[in-house]
Image (cartoon, rainbow, N blue to C red):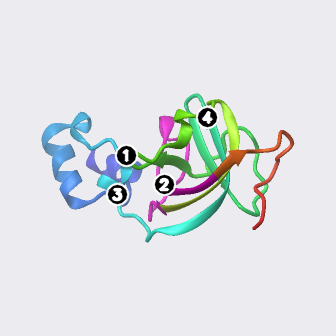
Amino acid sequence: MIIALRQVYPGMTAACWRRLHRDGEDALPRRVDQCFAMMPAQRWRGIWNDYFEGQQFCAAGRRCSGGYDRTQPWITFADGVRPTSDLPTNRRYVIEFIGRRTKMPGFYGHLGSSDHEIVVDRVISITPAPADAASAPRR
């Protein structure tokens, strides 16, 4: 069982492994950065697909579909950062932000639909994406 979980949760910290073993999956923190090794914060720009049960990010310069693609990181927002309170959901946005990506690929996001997850620490800008945006704009 532990070997299978290590394949599903690569990069999990030792403290979270102990918590998982002792108290079960429901005891794990909600945010990925509280249990998984993360890359240093960096500036990102691209398209955020903000859909029901789908929060994927397509980095600038990549050609991306509007549907699920494991190679597009799942995107979450640190507490108090999420910009959608004034924006409609089920849309695509051009977004620039400071964020941290998981170090190890795994099964992140809704039903493990992405290889990585990015936690947005600060939004720099966000605007609705053009309807024909098939790729993330370059800077």
Which is in the foreground here, disc 1 or disc 3? 1
Which is in the foreground here, disc 4 or disc 2? 4
Q: Dot 3, how many residues are within 10 Å of its Cα: few (below 14), some (14-19), or many (20+)?
A: many
* Image position of 14 (left or right of 88): left
> 59 or 110, which lies in front?
59
Q: Are marks 2 and 3 in contact (CB under 8 Å)?
A: no
Which is in the foreground here, disc 2 or disc 3? 2
* Image position of 49 (left or right of 3): right
**Amino acid on which disc 3 is placed:** Phe
Q: Which mark is residue 87?
A: 4
Label 3, label 4: how far apart the Cα atoms are: 29 Å
Please tell me which residue is depicted at 75% across the width and 68% down the height of the picture: 139
Q: Which mark is residue 79?
A: 1
Residue located beneath label 3 in the image: 36
Magenta segment: 100-125
Element type where label 1 sits in the image: loop
Q: Are marks 2 and 1 in contact (CB under 8 Å)?
A: no
Q: Position of residue 82 (x, y in %)?
A: 48, 43
Label 4, label 2: how far apart the Cα atoms are: 17 Å
Q: Residue extending furthest left? A: 22
**Amino acid on which disc 4 is placed:** Leu
Q: Position of residue 9 (x, y in %)?
A: 37, 51
Circle nearer the N terminus (1, 3): 3
Please tell me which residue is depicted at 62% across the width and 55% down the height of the picture: 125
Q: Position of residue 96 (x, y in %)?
A: 62, 58
* Image position of 45 (left or right of 133): left
Label 4, label 1: how far apart the Cα atoms are: 17 Å
Element type where label 3 sits in the image: loop
Label 2, label 1: how far apart the Cα atoms are: 9 Å
Circle nearer the N terminus (2, 1): 1
